[in-house]
Image (cartoon, helix red, strand yellow):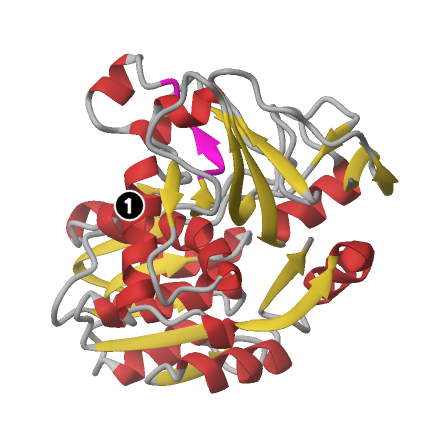
Amino acid sequence: MKVARFYAPGDIRLEEAPEPNPGPDEVKIAVKQCSTCGTDVKIFNHGHHHLVPPRVIGHEIAGEVVEVGSDVSGWAPGDRVQVIAAVPCGECAECQDGRMQVCPNQTSVGYHYDGGFAEYLIVPRQVLAVDGLNRIPDGVDFAEASVAEPLACVLNGQELAKVGPGDDVVVVGAGPIGCLHVRLARARGANRVFLVELNRSRLDMSAAKVKPDAAICSAEVDAVDEVKKLTDGRGVDVVITAAAAGAAQEDAQHMAARSGRISFFGGLPKDKPTITLDSNLVHYRELTIVGANGSSPAHNKKALELIASGQVPVADLITHRLRLSELHDAIKLVSSGSAIKVTIQS
């Protein structure tokens, strides 16, 4: 079979590899679609501390069951499935408390196990043990199902930030994650959603798809001032920073209304992980700041339901559909910011 295997920063090779066979507690799937994301670009450029090469990467996976291990029940060849990326242990205190997304023993598909940039994939027992193989609902195609993983992360973030009916929401960052945040905020009943982005062309491309109530280019105007104008000086109920930028997190504290919630959704670069926080703003305005890290198996199931019901459409966010042989082109597209979502068909 054909695979894309990471060897070192800048070195992902398209190779022929033996077709894998499942063990008794595993499931083999034919990968139909694996979406790319910014993390794939980071791995290509810098590697990852959880990834020991050589490794087949790709973690936003949808496919079809082709073989089931002898000890596995509930699955059969032909079943259409989506695979979780973040794999909790299911046994620690956090997992037992229902907070699987912060499992300290988490492993990941495409890091600790071979990923989805391949024609076939073995779903490991660790995924099956936490109910991490999900049926794709009728009417959802494989490409849409591959977007369930990032949507699951977005759902976790908005649950933690308590996005709900009547909220005014700012989303900072107009990449695929930002687009999903805009759509999910609307599905959760937000009153108005404003999209902020530094790059004008990226903002225009994304705004044309998700149609925020206002699209603010922070390279051209002061985004904090614009948000204040749009809210008669009040600020917004929720600010979500879907960008790896400390400046976005610093601006968020000034965009938030009294009792506002701020989600630090996008992590910061390892060499610049700190920001300046006005503690008095948090204190006197009773602001809440929450982090957001990945998703649980349950979030993935809910994400598929949101896509299937039409509450969060994703098909139009897939701007490019490429073949596995074009993976290097896909990485360049994602890196350039000229695409929203790029999927790979195996």
Q: Nearer the viewer, residue 54 or 275?
A: 54
Give how far across and how far down residue 76 sits, in percent. 42, 37
Where is residue 18 shown, x and y percent of the image?
79, 29
Q: Is residue 144 magenta?
A: no
Residue shown at the point (74%, 34%) measured from the top left: 47
Q: Is residue 279 visible?
A: no
Task: Give the left or right position of residue 120, taking residue 94 as reference.
Answer: right
Look at 31% across and 28% down and name the residue there: 100
Magenta region, residue range: 84-89
Give the amino acid at mark 1.
Answer: Ile
Vertical relation: 158 (above or below) 6? below
Q: SS at mark 1? A: strand
Q: Position of residue 312 (x, y in %)?
A: 33, 68
The location of residue 330, given as percent across then percent down, is 74, 61
- The residue that disc 1 covers is 289
Give the vertical position of 204 relative to 121 (above or below): below
Quarter location, residue 271: top right
Residue at 27% across, 50% down: 302
Camera-nearest residue between 89 and 225: 89
Q: Count neighbours of disc 1 (C-alpha within 10 A) and say few if under 14, some if 14 to 19, many if 20 or more.
A: some
Image point 15% across, 62% down: which residue?
164
Q: Is residue 282 visible?
A: yes
Residue 289, image quadrant: top left
Residue 73, quarter of picture? top left
Number of numbered discs on residues:
1
Q: Quadrant of the N terminus?
A: top right
Q: Does 208 sit above or below residue 5?
A: below
